[in-house]
Image (tube, helix red, strand yellow):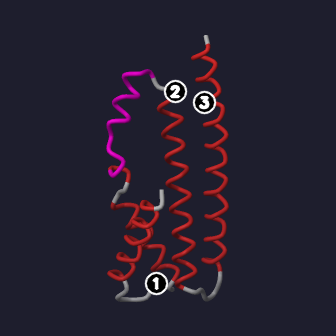
Amino acid sequence: MGTMRAQACDKQQLRGAYRDTFQQFEREAARLAQIHARLSYDPAEAEAALLRVEQARLAYNDTRDTLAALMMPREARQAFEAIPPAARQETRRVQGLAELFWELAGKPQGSAEDDWYRAERVVERAFACR
Protein backbone atom coordinates (compact mmCIF):
# COMPACT_ATOMS: atom_id res chain seq x y z
CA MET A 1 0.00 0.00 0.00
CA GLY A 2 2.88 2.37 0.83
CA THR A 3 4.45 1.78 -2.59
CA MET A 4 1.24 2.73 -4.39
CA ARG A 5 1.01 5.93 -2.34
CA ALA A 6 4.66 6.76 -3.12
CA GLN A 7 4.06 6.19 -6.85
CA ALA A 8 1.00 8.44 -6.77
CA CYS A 9 3.09 11.14 -5.05
CA ASP A 10 5.87 10.70 -7.64
CA LYS A 11 3.35 11.03 -10.48
CA GLN A 12 1.87 14.15 -8.90
CA GLN A 13 5.30 15.73 -8.50
CA LEU A 14 6.23 14.79 -12.06
CA ARG A 15 3.00 16.27 -13.38
CA GLY A 16 3.88 19.53 -11.62
CA ALA A 17 7.41 19.44 -13.01
CA TYR A 18 6.00 18.63 -16.46
CA ARG A 19 3.73 21.68 -16.29
CA ASP A 20 6.55 23.91 -14.97
CA THR A 21 9.04 22.85 -17.63
CA PHE A 22 6.48 23.42 -20.36
CA GLN A 23 5.75 26.91 -19.03
CA GLN A 24 9.49 27.67 -18.98
CA PHE A 25 9.78 26.47 -22.58
CA GLU A 26 6.79 28.62 -23.51
CA ARG A 27 8.35 31.73 -21.89
CA GLU A 28 11.70 31.22 -23.62
CA ALA A 29 10.00 30.64 -26.97
CA ALA A 30 8.02 33.88 -26.50
CA ARG A 31 11.26 35.78 -25.78
CA LEU A 32 12.78 34.35 -28.94
CA ALA A 33 9.70 35.37 -30.92
CA GLN A 34 10.12 38.93 -29.64
CA ILE A 35 13.72 38.97 -30.88
CA HIS A 36 12.61 37.54 -34.23
CA ALA A 37 9.92 40.23 -34.59
CA ARG A 38 12.46 43.05 -34.40
CA LEU A 39 13.66 44.71 -37.58
CA SER A 40 17.25 44.26 -36.48
CA TYR A 41 18.71 41.98 -33.87
CA ASP A 42 21.98 41.19 -32.15
CA PRO A 43 23.22 37.75 -33.32
CA ALA A 44 24.73 37.02 -29.89
CA GLU A 45 21.38 37.80 -28.25
CA ALA A 46 19.57 35.52 -30.71
CA GLU A 47 22.03 32.69 -30.12
CA ALA A 48 21.68 33.06 -26.34
CA ALA A 49 17.88 33.03 -26.70
CA LEU A 50 18.04 29.92 -28.87
CA LEU A 51 20.25 28.23 -26.29
CA ARG A 52 17.70 29.00 -23.55
CA VAL A 53 14.88 27.66 -25.74
CA GLU A 54 16.85 24.50 -26.49
CA GLN A 55 17.69 23.97 -22.81
CA ALA A 56 14.04 24.47 -21.84
CA ARG A 57 12.95 22.07 -24.60
CA LEU A 58 15.36 19.39 -23.39
CA ALA A 59 14.20 19.81 -19.77
CA TYR A 60 10.58 19.57 -20.88
CA ASN A 61 11.27 16.48 -23.01
CA ASP A 62 13.13 14.78 -20.15
CA THR A 63 10.29 15.46 -17.73
CA ARG A 64 7.70 14.31 -20.26
CA ASP A 65 9.63 11.11 -20.95
CA THR A 66 10.11 10.38 -17.24
CA LEU A 67 6.42 10.87 -16.54
CA ALA A 68 5.45 8.73 -19.54
CA ALA A 69 7.84 5.96 -18.47
CA LEU A 70 6.43 5.99 -14.93
CA MET A 71 2.96 5.40 -16.35
CA MET A 72 4.02 2.49 -18.60
CA PRO A 73 3.87 -1.17 -17.71
CA ARG A 74 7.26 -2.49 -16.56
CA GLU A 75 8.16 -4.24 -19.86
CA ALA A 76 7.35 -1.19 -21.96
CA ARG A 77 9.23 1.08 -19.54
CA GLN A 78 12.35 -1.09 -19.76
CA ALA A 79 12.24 -1.02 -23.56
CA PHE A 80 11.69 2.75 -23.53
CA GLU A 81 14.56 3.37 -21.11
CA ALA A 82 16.87 1.27 -23.30
CA ILE A 83 16.73 3.94 -26.02
CA PRO A 84 20.00 5.89 -25.75
CA PRO A 85 19.60 9.59 -24.86
CA ALA A 86 21.83 10.55 -27.81
CA ALA A 87 19.09 9.24 -30.12
CA ARG A 88 17.00 12.25 -29.10
CA GLN A 89 19.57 14.64 -30.57
CA GLU A 90 18.55 14.64 -34.19
CA THR A 91 19.90 16.25 -37.32
CA ARG A 92 16.42 17.72 -37.82
CA ARG A 93 16.87 19.78 -34.65
CA VAL A 94 20.13 21.27 -35.91
CA GLN A 95 18.55 21.90 -39.30
CA GLY A 96 15.60 23.71 -37.74
CA LEU A 97 17.84 25.94 -35.65
CA ALA A 98 20.09 26.67 -38.64
CA GLU A 99 17.05 27.75 -40.64
CA LEU A 100 15.96 29.99 -37.79
CA PHE A 101 19.42 31.63 -37.65
CA TRP A 102 19.17 32.20 -41.41
CA GLU A 103 15.71 33.75 -41.09
CA LEU A 104 16.78 35.96 -38.18
CA ALA A 105 19.66 37.28 -40.29
CA GLY A 106 17.30 38.22 -43.13
CA LYS A 107 17.90 35.11 -45.29
CA PRO A 108 21.34 36.11 -46.63
CA GLN A 109 22.99 34.17 -49.43
CA GLY A 110 25.99 32.02 -48.51
CA SER A 111 25.45 31.73 -44.76
CA ALA A 112 24.24 28.12 -44.67
CA GLU A 113 27.48 26.62 -43.39
CA ASP A 114 27.92 29.22 -40.63
CA ASP A 115 24.26 28.88 -39.64
CA TRP A 116 24.63 25.09 -39.45
CA TYR A 117 27.71 25.27 -37.22
CA ARG A 118 26.06 27.83 -34.94
CA ALA A 119 23.01 25.56 -34.65
CA GLU A 120 25.22 22.56 -33.84
CA ARG A 121 26.94 24.60 -31.12
CA VAL A 122 23.61 25.58 -29.58
CA VAL A 123 22.36 21.98 -29.55
CA GLU A 124 25.64 20.68 -28.13
CA ARG A 125 25.79 23.37 -25.41
CA ALA A 126 22.16 22.79 -24.45
CA PHE A 127 22.74 19.05 -24.28
CA ALA A 128 25.89 19.53 -22.16
CA CYS A 129 24.08 21.81 -19.65
CA ARG A 130 21.56 19.15 -18.70
- Residue 52 spot, x, y in % from top left: 56, 66
Can you name the residue that lies furthest to the front here? 2
Residue 93 bears which disc, if any?
none
120 on left or right of 5: left
Question: Disc 3 designates what residue?
Answer: 10
SS class of the residue under badge 2? Answer: helix
**Mark 2 touches mark 1? (CB < 8 Å):** no
Question: Which quadrant would residue 11 be assigned to in this image?
Answer: top right
19 vs 57: above or below = above
The amino acid beneath tag 2 is Met
Task: Tell me the distance, in whole angstroms, between the alpha carbons under discs 2 and 1.
Answer: 44 Å
Q: Which of disc 3 and disc 1 is earlier in sequence?
A: 3
Question: Disc 2 designates what residue?
Answer: 71
Q: Please identify the quadrant where the N terminus is shown.
A: top right
Residue 80 in magenta stretch = yes
Q: Main structural element of the magenta stretch: helix, strand or loop?
A: helix
Can you name the residue that lies furthest to the top here? 1
Q: Nearer the viewer, mark 2 or mark 3?
A: 3
Question: Disc 1 designates what residue?
Answer: 107
- Which residue does the image show at 61% across and 37% down from the upper left? 14
**Mark 2 touches mark 3? (CB < 8 Å):** no
